[in-house]
Image (cartoon, rainbow, N blue to C red):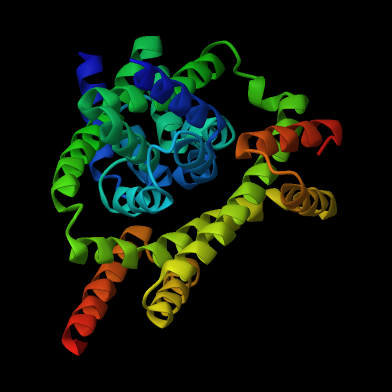
Amino acid sequence: MIYLTLFYEFFLIGLFAIGGGTTTIPFLFDLSAKYNWFSPEELTNMVAVSESTPGPIGINMATYAGYKTASYFGSIIATLGLVTPSVVIIILVSMVLKRYACNNTFKHLLQSLQPAVVALVLNATLQIAEVSLTGILPIFIFAFLLAFMHIYKANSVFYIILAGILGLALKL
Amino acid sequence: MKTLIDLFLTFFKTGLFTFGGGYAMLPILKDEVVKKHQWASENELLNYFSIGQCTPGIIAVNVATFCGYKLKKITGALVATFALVLPSLIIITLIASVLSHFMENEYVVHTMRGIRIGVAATLLKIVFDLGFRVYRQSTLKKVDIFVFFLALIAIILLKISSVFVILITAFIGCLSLGFERGGK
């Protein structure tokens, strides 16, 4: 029965959290008030773990909260609940998009959104920079990485791993 | 079948190397989806993000579903989403169950601090790449520059939700399209 409630609650979060993973956080605080699944303190801890482990934050949060509530199966059910609305809605949107893909007005409209998306990505960049560039050494590594990207072309995963190795080697 | 396996491997890799929110996966998706496999153009990828921003759910999942559906319909959408979510499920469950002190391990802390700098650097690079490309392709350069700075001010200074930023931009887009039509 707990699984059904878990699925239902995370389905609702998936349906109403519009605009990315961090928007799920207030919903999770509501959940901790409504049920005894996890305390607000645990939730704060969850946010920290979710932010610094691989994977989109929203998914990490759902998996963590699901596990705390109902162990392994709980983590799967919560994640499934969170993801289901997205998958259904995006499949429907894809079908509609396909129909209008050749419509010029629609193409122009989507194109007119691109400057705003660039601004959103810049904002995400600044947010990560704010928490990661906390001293002279981090700023130096950051500058080194940017220069290195210019000289040696590789894919992003390579630079991310390199940055992790540097962090470990230099005891950041 | 080969496409489905490629789709699975690509989005598993994306899920494994995305640290932070959905936007952090943009550099990896550009490498994998646009450059390596050519499943979508850079323009399409940006469209997925702007639509994913205004539709319910996690952006990362929305983008995976879009890419998967484009290639292999509903099966593709399910495979891509499952692959994206799988690393999280495994890693977080491990941390929550047996590795509860994992996050306090000093080596992990150092590595994570380094990784975050790497994510910031790859993101900054993609902001420049995208910015230049969008500017070059733009047919209404002045409007687009105005929209870019307006959006930036709205998000950073006014703390307006990114959903509204996209919706307001869509409204401005409609207006400028109307002007273009009217001028002809």
Quarter of the picture containing the N terminus of chain B is top left
B175 above or below B95?
below
* Residue B86, picture quadrant: top left
- In this view, the residue in front, A68 or A138, is A138
Q: Residue at x 41, y 36 (%)?
A: A58
B84 above or below A99?
above
- Position of residue B112 measured from the top left corner of the image (x, y, whole percent): 68, 34
- Position of residue A54 measured from the top left corner of the image (x, y, whole percent): 55, 30
Residue B79 visible in the shown view: yes
Residue A46 visible in the shown view: no
Relative horizontal placement of residue A139, taking residue B135 as reference (left or right): right
- In this view, the residue in front, A122 or A110, is A110
Q: Residue at x 35, y 14 (%)?
A: A70
Relative horizontal placement of residue B60, taking residue A17 as reference (left or right): right
- Position of residue B156 measured from the top left corner of the image (x, y, whole percent): 50, 67
Q: Residue at x 74, y 35 (%)?
A: A162
A112 above or below A42?
below
- Position of residue B74 measured from the top left corner of the image (x, y, whole percent): 21, 27
* Residue B70, picture quadrant: top left
Q: Residue at x 71, y 39 (%)?
A: B113
Quarter of the picture containing the C terminus of chain B is bottom left
Residue furthest bottom as drawn: B183
Q: How many marks?
A: 0
